[in-house]
Image (tube, coloured by chain):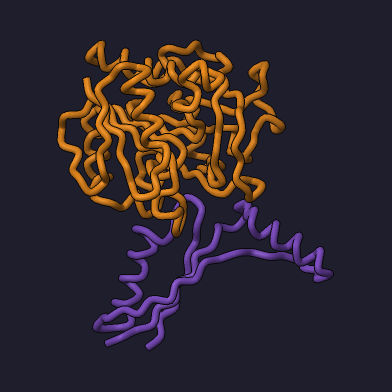
Amino acid sequence: MKFEVQITIALKEGMLDPEARAIQHALNNLGFATEGLKTANVYCITVNAPTADEARTRATEMCERLLANPVIHDYCIEVAQ
Amino acid sequence: MRFAVVQFGGSNCDRDVHHVLESVCGVDTDLVWYKERLGDRYDAVVIPGGFSYGDYLRAGAIAARTPIMADIIGHAGAGGLVLGICNGAQIGAESGLVEGTFTMNRAPKFICEWVYLRVETADSPFTSAYRKGEVIRIPIAHKEGRFVTSPENLERLERDGRIAFRFCDEQGSVTEESNPNGSLGNITGILGKGQNVLMMMPHPERASENVLGSLDGKRLFDSMIAYIARGE
């Protein structure tokens, strides 16, 4: 069965996010007042797995072994059919 | 005695390191393409700087998952020397050779400049030709070089004497102003658990000949060569 897995990788709470700071500054220059801004990477992956749970397990492994760096990142996985 | 300099697609300091080792230090050195296997004929392995895999995903992340890294980790596990410079340090950190990571600079831009480093330990195979507390001058060139690790690990690194270099000013004071990229504790060179692995953002190969303006980096290679010659 095919599942669409969406993985969001973001910096852990409290980690310095220099890109976010620069983007927020640029938005400010354009007149957009913002209270906060965070960056994240989203990976949309199609996996073949017998169940949604199995698809999630594989996505978790992908995060642990490559997509996220445990020193600085948290990740969030959403699975849809 | 034989050194290996590993080349990934996107490495661009490989020939500089090879030149310094072979022509300046006089050590037999092979360039080893990452698709080759390392074998057991090397005393030391250098992972050079560059932009392996275009820094996709995170600097060093893709190269860290290539098969030759298993060889390099095995080499380190057997007590062999492994030096990672700049992108090589990012690759080494991503592969777990040292604890921590090198990520986006405090100001998210590429910095290429000469900096001062304070030598934090002379008791390692990479730093024996320096004095503890000595100030040396070596250039940096990176965008993702800010050292980050957990507070618990920082404490462990400090306790075990595994911090090799910190950014400092000309007098050797470790200050906020002398920290070009926002690294935790100004740290820019860390040793592995067995002290036979060093991952550092500055480029010693760019400070290894008089014509380059500094010889301070050459002593790092001299330290490695002396360590191997002693047969420790």
- The x and y percentages for residue B163 are 48, 27
Q: Residue furthest left?
A: B40
Q: Which of B3 and B58 lies nearest the eye of the viewer?
A: B3
* Residue B141 in picture, x, y percent from top left: 55, 38
Query: Where does the image place residue B46, in percent across and percent down from the top left?
Result: 33, 33
Q: Is residue B197 above or below residue A34?
A: above
Above or below residue B76? Residue A71 is below
B180 displayed left or right of B209: right
Which residue is located at x 51 percent, y 16 percent? B210
Quadrant of the rendering where the C terminus of chain B is positioned: top left
- B81 left or right of B220 in image: left
Q: Colour of chain B?
A: orange
Camera sees residue B99: no
Q: Position of residue B169 (x, y in %)?
A: 67, 23
What shade has chain A been given?
Answer: purple
Place residue B57 in its image quadrant. Answer: bottom left
Of all residues, the one furthest to the right in this rendering is: A31
